[in-house]
Every structure is written in C-alpha cells, then in structure tokens.
Amino acid sequence: GQLPKGAAYLEAEGEKSHEGARVSPGEI
C-alpha cells in the first residue's frame, strides 16, 4: 500500500526484526 517514508521504513525494519530481534521498531 501507499505508506509515508517513515512508515515504510518501520514496516521493513519490523519484518527484519521478526528474524532476529525480539522487539520490532513499531512496538517500541
């Protein structure tokens, strides 16, 4: 979908975080 740059970044980081990190940027 159409997301602001910040939202797209958080979404991408969240996807990566599910692999290794415990908490995604979107949950902080």
Image (tube, rainbow, N blue to C red):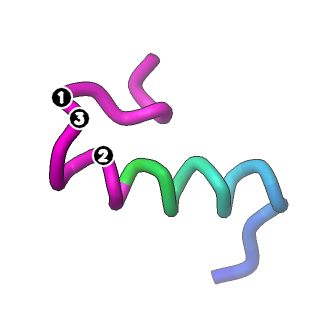
Which quadrant holds the N terminus?
A: bottom right
Q: Where does the image place residue 18, in percent across and percent down from the top left?
A: 20, 50
Q: Is residue 15 above or below residue 17?
A: below
Q: Which amino acid does label 3 sit on?
A: Ala
Residue ID for mark 1: 22
For this view, does 17 lie left or right of residue 20? Answer: right
Q: How far apart are marks 3 and 2 (CA)?
A: 5 Å
Mark 3 burial class by Cα count in 10 Å: few <14, some 14-19, many 20+: few
Residue kind at label 2, given as amino acid type: Ser
Q: Residue at x 82, y 60 (%)?
A: 5
Q: In this view, does 21 lie to the left or right of 27?
A: left
Q: Are marks 3 and 2 in contact (CB under 8 Å)?
A: yes
Q: Which amino acid does label 1 sit on?
A: Arg
Mark 1 falls on what kind of element? loop
In the displayed structure, would residue 25 be above or below residue 15?
above
Residue 9's x, y, as percent? 65, 56
Q: Name the residue under label 2.
A: 17
**Which residue is labeled 3 in the image?**
21
Q: Do the residues labelled 3 and 1 touch (CB within 8 Å)?
A: yes
**Magenta region, residue range:** 15-28
Q: Was residue 23 drawn as part of the magenta stretch in this picture?
A: yes
Is 23 drawn above or below residue 10 in the view shown? above
Q: Judge whether residue 17 is colored magenta.
A: yes
Front residue (pair 28, 20): 20
Q: Is residue 2 above or below residue 13?
A: below
Q: Give the image location of residue 7, x and y in percent.
A: 69, 53
- Mark 2 closeness class: few <14, some 14–19, many ≥20 residues within 10 Å: some
Left or right of 7, for residue 21: left
